[in-house]
Amino acid sequence: MRGWSSMVCALVVCGAIAGCGTGGRGEAATAAADAFTSALREGDGAAACAALAPETAEDLAASEGESCEEAIGSLDLPDAAVGEIAVWSDRAQMRTADDVLFLAEFGDGWKVVAAGCRPQGERPYECEVGS
């Protein structure tokens, strides 16, 4: 958890100071975030879990004591359409109207590593899924 929080802070600083760009990778990250939020809107737990990074899906299931599909359906995650994106190498931050998603690029594409995230002032984001 601590490592991800530090990385999130670094990403925010990078975006604020250096103006890191999205390049062509932004479209793929946006598509992954959209797949996740669309699955939430449609109540498709299997598709939402498939859009999560494997470790994030496993951690969610373990923390809730049920399958990822059941656990994600019981959370009150925002399902708003994706909005502003910032991409830094193999990491991305996607803002929706209601929250922030964090994504990472894996060998098989972009996956959501944290969702339902809200800023906490100077502290790291607080996330419902992942951290």
Image (spheres, helix red, strand yellow):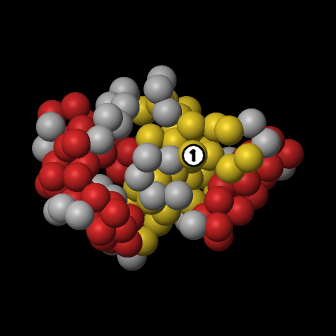
Foreground of the two, 114 or 28: 114
Q: Is residue 68 above or below residue 100?
A: below
Q: Which amino acid type corresponds to the residue marked 1 in the rendered image?
A: Glu
Q: Residue furthest toward the bottom?
A: 107
Give the SS element for disc 1: strand
Q: Which residue is mark 1?
A: 126
What residue is shown at x 48% (from left), y 23% (from top)? 97
Q: Position of residue 81 (x, y in %)?
A: 37, 28
27 to the left or right of 58: right
Q: Position of residue 46 (x, y in %)?
A: 14, 54
What residue is shown at x 64% (from left), y 67% (from top)? 2
Location of the N terminus by quadrant is bottom right
Foreground of the two, 35 or 129: 129
Q: Residue furthest toward the top?
A: 97
Query: Can residue 24 be seen?
Result: no
45 to the left or right of 19: left
The number of callouts visible is 1
Q: Position of residue 71 (x, y in %)?
A: 23, 52
129 to the left or right of 10: left
Neighbour class for label 1 at 10 Å: few (<14), some, many (≥20)? some
What residue is shown at x 86% (from left), y 45% (from top)? 17
Query: Can residue 96 be seen?
Result: yes
Q: Position of residue 98 (x, y in %)?
A: 47, 26
What residue is shown at x 45% (from left), y 58% (from top)? 130
Res. 66 image quadrant: bottom left
Q: Is residue 76 above or below residue 130?
A: above
